[in-house]
Amino acid sequence: MNTETKKTVLVAVGVIENATGDIFICRRGASQHQANKWEFPGGKVEAGETVEQALTRELAEEVGITVERCQPLMQLEHDYGDKQVKLAIHKVTAFSGEPRGLEGQPSRWVPVSKLAQYDFPEANGPIVEKLTAPGA
């Protein structure tokens, strides 16, 4: 499949940080793209939504929190061969509720220093690098 016919999917991604600086991650289901890898929660931006609206909706649906404050962290594009994604990553620093895997997916709080020990989709590599960089 050549890149001219491949659709790019815009995805809102939330790097959820708690008061102690830990990051919330979830594991993808066995039937999902990039199955069984750990990820920062989020999802596809629907037509007519802003990235922030999609992030708020997806985090409410997926992990049960209400976003109160977030700011852009970075954007990146990645071509998996079968799918091209554009990730709009926001750091979520204030929220209400306690995040948990509402879709039955395993989830946990992880210290930033331990993120690199988890198997993330290739597109998430630059996010982990940015979060774990000295002075980040």
Image (tube, rainbow, N blue to C red):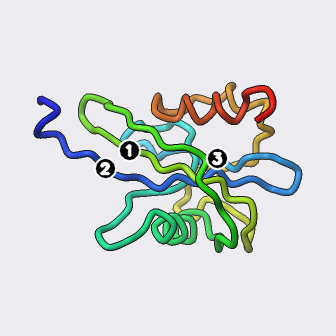
Query: Residue flagged by tag 3: what amino acid is it?
Result: Ile
- SS for dot 1: strand
Left/right placement of residue 18 relative to residue 129 reads right
Query: Residue flagged by tag 1: what amino acid is it?
Result: Lys
Q: Which residue is mark 2?
A: 9
Cα–Cα gap, marks 2 and 1: 6 Å
Residue 82 place in picture, x, y as percent: 24, 34
Query: Residue flagged by tag 2: what amino acid is it?
Result: Val
Disc 2 crowd, CA 10 A, few/some/many (<14, 14-19, 20+): some
Residue 116 place in picture, x, y as percent: 68, 26
Residue 49 versus residue 31 in the image, above or below: below
Disc 3 crowd, CA 10 A, few/some/many (<14, 14-19, 20+): many
Cα–Cα gap, marks 2 and 3: 21 Å
For image coordinates 70% across by 32% down, the residue present is: 115
Left/right placement of residue 51 relative to residue 9 reads right
Q: Quadrant of residue 81?
A: top left
- Using the image, tell me which numbered label, if any, was put on residue 86: 1
Proximity of marks 2 and 1: CB atoms separated by less than 8 Å? yes
- Using the image, tell me which numbered label, if any, was put on residue 25: 3
